[in-house]
Amino acid sequence: MKRLLYEFTESFRIAWAQIRANKMRSVLTALGVIIGIVAVTLMGTAIRGIDTGFQSSLAMLGDDVLYVQKWPWGPVEDWWNYNNRPNVRPQDAETLNRIINSTQNSLLKFAVPVVARSSSVKYGDAKANSVFTIGTQAEYAQISGAEYFEGRLFNEAEAAAGREVVTLGHDVAEALFPARSPVGQTVIISGHPFEVIGVFAKQGEFLGLFSFDNQVIIPITAFQKYFSIRRGAELRVKIADKSRLEEAKDELVGAMRRVRGQLPGERDNFSINEQQAFKAQLDPVKQGIALAGLFITGLSLFVGAIGIMNITFVSVKERTKEIGTRKALGARRRSILLQFLIEAVSICLIGGAVGMVISFTMFLGVRQAAPNFPVEFSPDLVLVSMLVSVITGIVSGFAPAFGASRLDPVVALRYE
Protein backbone atom coordinates (compact mmCIF):
# COMPACT_ATOMS: atom_id res chain seq x y z
CA MET A 1 0.00 0.00 0.00
CA LYS A 2 2.83 2.33 0.90
CA ARG A 3 4.58 1.57 -2.42
CA LEU A 4 1.38 2.21 -4.38
CA LEU A 5 0.94 5.55 -2.64
CA TYR A 6 4.52 6.47 -3.50
CA GLU A 7 3.95 5.51 -7.14
CA PHE A 8 0.85 7.71 -7.29
CA THR A 9 2.70 10.65 -5.76
CA GLU A 10 5.68 10.25 -8.07
CA SER A 11 3.41 9.86 -11.12
CA PHE A 12 1.62 13.11 -10.27
CA ARG A 13 4.93 14.90 -9.85
CA ILE A 14 6.21 13.69 -13.24
CA ALA A 15 2.84 14.47 -14.91
CA TRP A 16 2.79 18.05 -13.64
CA ALA A 17 6.42 18.55 -14.61
CA GLN A 18 5.60 17.48 -18.18
CA ILE A 19 2.49 19.71 -18.32
CA ARG A 20 4.49 22.72 -17.13
CA ALA A 21 7.24 21.98 -19.62
CA ASN A 22 4.72 21.87 -22.50
CA LYS A 23 2.14 24.48 -21.46
CA MET A 24 0.88 25.45 -24.91
CA ARG A 25 0.61 21.84 -26.06
CA SER A 26 -1.31 20.94 -22.90
CA VAL A 27 -3.73 23.86 -23.33
CA LEU A 28 -4.44 23.00 -26.96
CA THR A 29 -4.87 19.34 -26.04
CA ALA A 30 -7.40 20.24 -23.32
CA LEU A 31 -9.41 22.50 -25.64
CA GLY A 32 -11.78 19.74 -26.73
CA VAL A 33 -12.45 18.81 -23.10
CA ILE A 34 -13.04 22.48 -22.23
CA ILE A 35 -15.67 22.81 -24.96
CA GLY A 36 -17.31 19.54 -23.90
CA ILE A 37 -17.49 20.57 -20.23
CA VAL A 38 -18.93 23.98 -21.15
CA ALA A 39 -21.56 22.22 -23.26
CA VAL A 40 -22.57 19.69 -20.59
CA THR A 41 -22.64 22.37 -17.88
CA LEU A 42 -24.72 24.83 -19.91
CA MET A 43 -27.10 22.03 -20.89
CA GLY A 44 -27.58 21.06 -17.24
CA THR A 45 -27.98 24.71 -16.24
CA ALA A 46 -30.61 25.27 -18.94
CA ILE A 47 -32.63 22.17 -18.03
CA ARG A 48 -32.49 22.93 -14.31
CA GLY A 49 -33.45 26.53 -15.01
CA ILE A 50 -36.44 25.44 -17.08
CA ASP A 51 -37.54 23.07 -14.31
CA THR A 52 -37.14 25.76 -11.65
CA GLY A 53 -39.03 28.37 -13.66
CA PHE A 54 -41.72 25.87 -14.58
CA GLN A 55 -42.29 24.68 -11.02
CA SER A 56 -42.35 28.27 -9.78
CA SER A 57 -44.91 29.19 -12.42
CA LEU A 58 -47.06 26.16 -11.66
CA ALA A 59 -47.00 27.03 -7.96
CA MET A 60 -48.73 30.30 -8.88
CA LEU A 61 -51.46 28.38 -10.69
CA GLY A 62 -51.96 26.07 -7.73
CA ASP A 63 -51.29 22.33 -7.79
CA ASP A 64 -54.66 21.61 -6.17
CA VAL A 65 -56.82 23.47 -8.70
CA LEU A 66 -58.66 22.18 -11.77
CA TYR A 67 -59.76 24.52 -14.56
CA VAL A 68 -63.09 24.09 -16.36
CA GLN A 69 -62.82 25.84 -19.73
CA LYS A 70 -64.15 25.74 -23.27
CA TRP A 71 -60.76 24.92 -24.80
CA PRO A 72 -58.12 22.42 -23.63
CA TRP A 73 -54.55 23.41 -22.84
CA GLY A 74 -52.54 21.91 -25.65
CA PRO A 75 -52.86 21.09 -29.34
CA VAL A 76 -56.37 20.77 -30.76
CA GLU A 77 -57.17 18.43 -33.66
CA ASP A 78 -60.95 18.77 -34.06
CA TRP A 79 -61.01 22.59 -34.04
CA TRP A 80 -64.66 22.98 -35.15
CA ASN A 81 -65.88 20.70 -32.37
CA TYR A 82 -64.22 22.85 -29.71
CA ASN A 83 -65.22 26.11 -31.39
CA ASN A 84 -68.90 25.10 -31.42
CA ARG A 85 -68.96 24.30 -27.72
CA PRO A 86 -71.09 26.60 -25.56
CA ASN A 87 -69.13 29.03 -23.40
CA VAL A 88 -68.65 28.34 -19.72
CA ARG A 89 -70.91 30.79 -17.84
CA PRO A 90 -70.21 32.44 -14.46
CA GLN A 91 -73.53 31.12 -13.10
CA ASP A 92 -72.36 27.55 -13.78
CA ALA A 93 -70.24 27.93 -10.63
CA GLU A 94 -73.37 28.23 -8.46
CA THR A 95 -74.90 25.07 -9.94
CA LEU A 96 -71.61 23.21 -9.61
CA ASN A 97 -71.21 24.29 -5.98
CA ARG A 98 -74.70 22.98 -5.18
CA ILE A 99 -73.76 19.60 -6.68
CA ILE A 100 -70.48 19.54 -4.73
CA ASN A 101 -72.26 20.38 -1.44
CA SER A 102 -74.83 17.64 -1.99
CA THR A 103 -72.20 14.97 -2.76
CA GLN A 104 -71.03 12.92 0.21
CA ASN A 105 -67.24 12.65 0.67
CA SER A 106 -66.70 14.84 -2.38
CA LEU A 107 -63.10 15.34 -3.50
CA LEU A 108 -64.07 18.84 -4.67
CA LYS A 109 -64.25 21.78 -2.26
CA PHE A 110 -65.76 24.65 -4.25
CA ALA A 111 -65.78 26.33 -7.65
CA VAL A 112 -64.98 29.97 -8.39
CA PRO A 113 -65.92 31.72 -11.66
CA VAL A 114 -63.25 33.83 -13.35
CA VAL A 115 -63.79 36.26 -16.24
CA ALA A 116 -61.06 38.40 -17.75
CA ARG A 117 -60.27 41.09 -20.29
CA SER A 118 -57.48 43.52 -21.14
CA SER A 119 -57.99 47.07 -19.85
CA SER A 120 -56.23 50.36 -19.33
CA VAL A 121 -55.82 51.58 -15.75
CA LYS A 122 -55.29 55.27 -14.98
CA TYR A 123 -54.52 57.43 -11.99
CA GLY A 124 -54.10 61.10 -12.74
CA ASP A 125 -51.62 61.41 -15.58
CA ALA A 126 -50.18 57.93 -15.01
CA LYS A 127 -51.52 55.10 -17.15
CA ALA A 128 -50.93 51.35 -17.47
CA ASN A 129 -52.04 49.70 -20.71
CA SER A 130 -52.95 46.09 -21.49
CA VAL A 131 -53.58 45.24 -17.85
CA PHE A 132 -55.15 41.80 -17.29
CA THR A 133 -58.42 42.60 -15.52
CA ILE A 134 -59.99 39.70 -13.63
CA GLY A 135 -63.51 39.50 -12.26
CA THR A 136 -64.12 36.81 -9.65
CA GLN A 137 -65.53 36.02 -6.21
CA ALA A 138 -64.05 36.41 -2.73
CA GLU A 139 -63.10 32.69 -2.61
CA TYR A 140 -60.48 33.44 -5.25
CA ALA A 141 -58.11 34.28 -2.39
CA GLN A 142 -58.21 30.62 -1.27
CA ILE A 143 -57.27 29.42 -4.76
CA SER A 144 -54.56 31.85 -5.82
CA GLY A 145 -52.48 31.66 -2.63
CA ALA A 146 -51.00 35.07 -3.51
CA GLU A 147 -49.58 37.21 -0.72
CA TYR A 148 -50.31 40.91 -0.26
CA PHE A 149 -47.81 43.75 -0.25
CA GLU A 150 -50.47 45.81 1.53
CA GLY A 151 -54.23 45.77 1.94
CA ARG A 152 -56.43 42.83 0.98
CA LEU A 153 -58.80 41.29 -1.54
CA PHE A 154 -62.51 42.19 -1.49
CA ASN A 155 -64.77 40.18 0.83
CA GLU A 156 -68.08 38.40 0.21
CA ALA A 157 -70.19 41.40 1.23
CA GLU A 158 -68.36 43.70 -1.19
CA ALA A 159 -68.63 41.13 -3.97
CA ALA A 160 -72.36 40.57 -3.37
CA ALA A 161 -73.02 44.31 -3.41
CA GLY A 162 -71.04 44.75 -6.63
CA ARG A 163 -68.82 47.42 -5.06
CA GLU A 164 -66.24 49.07 -7.28
CA VAL A 165 -63.15 47.92 -5.38
CA VAL A 166 -59.91 46.59 -6.84
CA THR A 167 -56.69 44.86 -5.78
CA LEU A 168 -53.71 45.84 -7.94
CA GLY A 169 -50.85 43.71 -9.18
CA HIS A 170 -47.42 44.82 -7.99
CA ASP A 171 -46.24 46.25 -11.34
CA VAL A 172 -49.52 48.12 -11.90
CA ALA A 173 -49.26 49.69 -8.44
CA GLU A 174 -45.66 50.77 -9.06
CA ALA A 175 -46.54 52.26 -12.46
CA LEU A 176 -49.43 54.31 -11.11
CA PHE A 177 -48.17 55.07 -7.59
CA PRO A 178 -44.35 55.10 -7.74
CA ALA A 179 -43.87 57.07 -4.52
CA ARG A 180 -47.00 56.55 -2.43
CA SER A 181 -49.42 53.91 -1.16
CA PRO A 182 -52.32 53.25 -3.56
CA VAL A 183 -54.68 51.93 -0.85
CA GLY A 184 -57.65 54.25 -0.50
CA GLN A 185 -57.02 55.94 -3.86
CA THR A 186 -59.37 55.74 -6.85
CA VAL A 187 -58.16 54.42 -10.21
CA ILE A 188 -59.99 54.46 -13.52
CA ILE A 189 -60.35 51.05 -15.23
CA SER A 190 -61.47 51.54 -18.84
CA GLY A 191 -63.37 54.69 -17.86
CA HIS A 192 -64.91 53.39 -14.60
CA PRO A 193 -63.76 54.41 -11.09
CA PHE A 194 -62.59 51.74 -8.63
CA GLU A 195 -61.28 52.18 -5.08
CA VAL A 196 -57.94 50.46 -4.39
CA ILE A 197 -58.16 48.20 -1.32
CA GLY A 198 -54.98 46.17 -1.74
CA VAL A 199 -51.77 45.43 -3.63
CA PHE A 200 -50.40 41.95 -4.32
CA ALA A 201 -46.80 41.12 -3.45
CA LYS A 202 -44.53 40.56 -6.44
CA GLN A 203 -45.24 37.16 -8.00
CA GLY A 204 -43.25 37.06 -11.25
CA GLU A 205 -44.09 35.61 -14.65
CA PHE A 206 -45.65 32.41 -15.91
CA LEU A 207 -43.11 30.71 -18.23
CA GLY A 208 -42.11 34.16 -19.51
CA LEU A 209 -45.50 34.47 -21.27
CA PHE A 210 -47.67 36.25 -18.72
CA SER A 211 -46.92 38.46 -15.73
CA PHE A 212 -48.94 37.91 -12.57
CA ASP A 213 -47.88 41.42 -11.53
CA ASN A 214 -49.62 43.07 -14.50
CA GLN A 215 -53.16 42.31 -13.36
CA VAL A 216 -56.01 43.79 -11.30
CA ILE A 217 -58.80 41.86 -9.60
CA ILE A 218 -62.34 43.17 -9.08
CA PRO A 219 -65.65 41.56 -7.95
CA ILE A 220 -67.33 39.63 -10.77
CA THR A 221 -70.56 41.53 -10.09
CA ALA A 222 -68.78 44.82 -10.83
CA PHE A 223 -67.14 43.26 -13.87
CA GLN A 224 -70.54 42.19 -15.27
CA LYS A 225 -71.91 45.68 -14.60
CA TYR A 226 -69.35 47.43 -16.80
CA PHE A 227 -67.77 44.88 -19.13
CA SER A 228 -68.90 42.25 -21.60
CA ILE A 229 -68.38 38.53 -21.01
CA ARG A 230 -69.12 37.40 -24.57
CA ARG A 231 -66.05 35.15 -24.49
CA GLY A 232 -67.41 33.30 -21.50
CA ALA A 233 -65.69 32.44 -18.25
CA GLU A 234 -63.69 29.68 -16.63
CA LEU A 235 -64.32 27.82 -13.40
CA ARG A 236 -61.46 27.18 -11.00
CA VAL A 237 -62.22 24.24 -8.77
CA LYS A 238 -60.36 23.64 -5.52
CA ILE A 239 -59.81 19.95 -4.74
CA ALA A 240 -59.67 18.43 -1.27
CA ASP A 241 -56.75 16.03 -1.75
CA LYS A 242 -54.21 16.70 -4.49
CA SER A 243 -52.81 13.17 -4.16
CA ARG A 244 -56.15 11.98 -5.61
CA LEU A 245 -56.15 14.41 -8.51
CA GLU A 246 -57.34 11.94 -11.15
CA GLU A 247 -60.28 10.83 -9.00
CA ALA A 248 -61.21 14.46 -8.38
CA LYS A 249 -60.99 15.12 -12.09
CA ASP A 250 -63.36 12.24 -12.85
CA GLU A 251 -65.82 13.53 -10.25
CA LEU A 252 -65.63 17.01 -11.76
CA VAL A 253 -66.37 15.65 -15.25
CA GLY A 254 -69.50 13.94 -13.94
CA ALA A 255 -70.61 17.05 -12.04
CA MET A 256 -70.06 19.33 -15.06
CA ARG A 257 -72.07 16.99 -17.28
CA ARG A 258 -74.94 17.44 -14.83
CA VAL A 259 -74.43 21.21 -14.89
CA ARG A 260 -74.56 21.17 -18.70
CA GLY A 261 -77.48 18.71 -18.79
CA GLN A 262 -75.64 16.29 -21.05
CA LEU A 263 -77.11 12.88 -21.83
CA PRO A 264 -75.19 9.58 -21.59
CA GLY A 265 -73.15 8.97 -24.75
CA GLU A 266 -72.77 12.66 -25.61
CA ARG A 267 -69.26 14.05 -25.90
CA ASP A 268 -68.15 16.41 -23.16
CA ASN A 269 -68.71 20.00 -24.29
CA PHE A 270 -66.13 21.38 -21.87
CA SER A 271 -62.48 20.73 -20.99
CA ILE A 272 -60.91 19.99 -17.60
CA ASN A 273 -57.40 21.43 -17.56
CA GLU A 274 -54.61 20.91 -15.06
CA GLN A 275 -50.91 21.64 -14.62
CA GLN A 276 -49.83 18.36 -16.21
CA ALA A 277 -50.92 19.68 -19.62
CA PHE A 278 -48.13 22.27 -19.44
CA LYS A 279 -45.65 19.64 -18.28
CA ALA A 280 -46.52 17.43 -21.26
CA GLN A 281 -45.74 20.34 -23.59
CA LEU A 282 -42.53 21.23 -21.79
CA ASP A 283 -41.02 17.73 -21.73
CA PRO A 284 -40.27 17.64 -25.50
CA VAL A 285 -38.49 21.00 -25.18
CA LYS A 286 -36.33 19.65 -22.36
CA GLN A 287 -35.62 16.47 -24.32
CA GLY A 288 -34.62 18.50 -27.36
CA ILE A 289 -32.18 20.58 -25.29
CA ALA A 290 -30.78 17.42 -23.69
CA LEU A 291 -30.29 15.65 -27.05
CA ALA A 292 -28.64 18.69 -28.63
CA GLY A 293 -26.44 19.16 -25.57
CA LEU A 294 -25.45 15.49 -25.48
CA PHE A 295 -24.58 15.53 -29.17
CA ILE A 296 -22.39 18.64 -28.83
CA THR A 297 -20.87 17.33 -25.60
CA GLY A 298 -20.19 13.87 -27.03
CA LEU A 299 -18.64 15.30 -30.19
CA SER A 300 -16.44 17.73 -28.27
CA LEU A 301 -15.29 15.12 -25.78
CA PHE A 302 -14.63 12.63 -28.59
CA VAL A 303 -12.43 15.15 -30.41
CA GLY A 304 -10.77 16.05 -27.12
CA ALA A 305 -10.15 12.39 -26.27
CA ILE A 306 -8.58 11.77 -29.68
CA GLY A 307 -6.32 14.77 -29.15
CA ILE A 308 -5.27 13.61 -25.69
CA MET A 309 -4.65 10.08 -26.94
CA ASN A 310 -2.54 11.41 -29.81
CA ILE A 311 -0.48 13.69 -27.57
CA THR A 312 0.01 10.87 -25.04
CA PHE A 313 1.31 8.61 -27.83
CA VAL A 314 3.70 11.41 -28.86
CA SER A 315 4.80 11.82 -25.25
CA VAL A 316 5.47 8.08 -24.99
CA LYS A 317 7.58 8.20 -28.16
CA GLU A 318 9.54 11.24 -26.93
CA ARG A 319 10.30 9.57 -23.59
CA THR A 320 10.92 6.01 -24.77
CA LYS A 321 14.55 6.08 -23.59
CA GLU A 322 13.42 7.46 -20.19
CA ILE A 323 10.92 4.58 -19.90
CA GLY A 324 13.70 2.10 -20.73
CA THR A 325 15.96 3.61 -18.06
CA ARG A 326 13.23 3.48 -15.42
CA LYS A 327 12.37 -0.13 -16.23
CA ALA A 328 16.04 -1.11 -16.21
CA LEU A 329 16.31 0.39 -12.71
CA GLY A 330 13.38 -1.73 -11.51
CA ALA A 331 10.24 0.31 -12.28
CA ARG A 332 7.18 -1.88 -12.59
CA ARG A 333 4.74 -1.86 -15.48
CA ARG A 334 2.16 -0.42 -13.08
CA SER A 335 4.38 2.58 -12.37
CA ILE A 336 4.81 3.36 -16.08
CA LEU A 337 1.07 2.87 -16.70
CA LEU A 338 0.17 5.21 -13.84
CA GLN A 339 2.66 7.83 -15.00
CA PHE A 340 1.07 8.36 -18.43
CA LEU A 341 -2.48 7.67 -17.31
CA ILE A 342 -2.27 10.33 -14.59
CA GLU A 343 -0.76 12.75 -17.11
CA ALA A 344 -3.77 12.28 -19.43
CA VAL A 345 -6.24 12.59 -16.54
CA SER A 346 -4.48 15.72 -15.27
CA ILE A 347 -4.84 17.42 -18.66
CA CYS A 348 -8.53 16.53 -18.68
CA LEU A 349 -9.00 17.84 -15.14
CA ILE A 350 -7.38 21.13 -16.12
CA GLY A 351 -9.71 21.30 -19.11
CA GLY A 352 -12.67 20.51 -16.87
CA ALA A 353 -11.73 23.21 -14.36
CA VAL A 354 -11.28 25.83 -17.09
CA GLY A 355 -14.60 24.75 -18.63
CA MET A 356 -16.34 25.13 -15.26
CA VAL A 357 -14.92 28.64 -14.81
CA ILE A 358 -16.11 29.65 -18.30
CA SER A 359 -19.57 28.16 -17.68
CA PHE A 360 -19.94 29.85 -14.29
CA THR A 361 -18.84 33.19 -15.78
CA MET A 362 -21.47 32.83 -18.51
CA PHE A 363 -24.06 31.91 -15.87
CA LEU A 364 -23.26 35.06 -13.86
CA GLY A 365 -23.45 37.12 -17.06
CA VAL A 366 -26.93 35.78 -17.86
CA ARG A 367 -28.08 36.39 -14.26
CA GLN A 368 -26.79 39.96 -14.46
CA ALA A 369 -28.27 40.71 -17.89
CA ALA A 370 -31.62 38.97 -17.33
CA PRO A 371 -32.37 38.57 -13.59
CA ASN A 372 -35.81 37.08 -14.27
CA PHE A 373 -34.52 34.45 -16.67
CA PRO A 374 -34.74 31.01 -14.98
CA VAL A 375 -31.18 29.66 -14.77
CA GLU A 376 -29.75 27.59 -11.96
CA PHE A 377 -26.13 26.54 -11.45
CA SER A 378 -26.07 23.47 -9.23
CA PRO A 379 -23.07 22.01 -7.32
CA ASP A 380 -24.08 18.67 -8.83
CA LEU A 381 -22.96 20.01 -12.22
CA VAL A 382 -19.45 20.53 -10.84
CA LEU A 383 -19.25 16.91 -9.70
CA VAL A 384 -20.65 15.62 -13.00
CA SER A 385 -18.22 17.74 -15.01
CA MET A 386 -15.22 16.60 -13.01
CA LEU A 387 -16.33 12.97 -13.28
CA VAL A 388 -16.71 13.34 -17.06
CA SER A 389 -13.21 14.86 -17.22
CA VAL A 390 -11.66 11.97 -15.27
CA ILE A 391 -13.45 9.32 -17.38
CA THR A 392 -12.34 11.06 -20.59
CA GLY A 393 -8.73 11.11 -19.34
CA ILE A 394 -8.78 7.43 -18.39
CA VAL A 395 -10.38 6.30 -21.67
CA SER A 396 -8.13 8.41 -23.89
CA GLY A 397 -4.92 7.80 -21.97
CA PHE A 398 -5.18 4.09 -21.27
CA ALA A 399 -4.07 2.77 -24.68
CA PRO A 400 -0.82 4.79 -24.93
CA ALA A 401 -0.11 4.28 -21.21
CA PHE A 402 -0.61 0.54 -21.54
CA GLY A 403 1.66 0.51 -24.59
CA ALA A 404 4.35 2.36 -22.65
CA SER A 405 4.13 -0.10 -19.76
CA ARG A 406 4.67 -3.04 -22.18
CA LEU A 407 7.87 -1.65 -23.73
CA ASP A 408 10.92 -3.93 -23.61
CA PRO A 409 13.60 -2.05 -21.61
CA VAL A 410 16.39 -3.24 -23.94
CA VAL A 411 14.56 -2.02 -27.04
CA ALA A 412 13.56 1.22 -25.29
CA LEU A 413 17.16 1.98 -24.26
CA ARG A 414 18.33 1.57 -27.87
CA TYR A 415 15.53 3.84 -29.21
CA GLU A 416 16.84 6.99 -30.94
Image: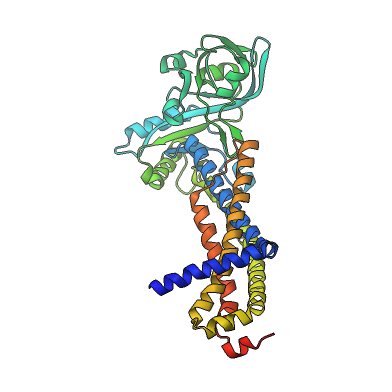
Q: In which quarter of the image is residue 308?
A: bottom right
Left or right of residue 410, residue 143 in this image: left
**Nearest the camera: 251 or 280?**
280
Q: Where is residue 159 in the image (x, y as percent from the top left)?
A: 46, 17
Q: Is residue 403 visible?
A: no
Q: Identify the image quadrant of residue 328.
A: bottom right
Q: Does 35 appear above or below 54?
A: below
Q: Viewer-proximal residue, 124 or 291?
A: 291
Check the image and name the residue furthest to the left: 104
Q: Can residue 199 be seen in this view?
A: yes
Percent across and percent down for residue 162 are: 49, 14
Q: Which residue is drawn at 59% across and 57% down?
A: 40
- Measuring from the top left, give residue 344's x and y in whole percent: 58, 69
Question: Tag count in the figure?
Answer: 0
Residue 398, relative to residue 105: is it above or below? Answer: below
Identify which residue, 15 or 134, lies in the foreground.
15
Q: Residue at x 62, y 86 (%)?
A: 413
Q: What x and y, as percent, mark residue 146?
A: 46, 28
Point 42% across, 40% down: residue:
252
Q: In which quarter of the image is residue 226?
A: top right
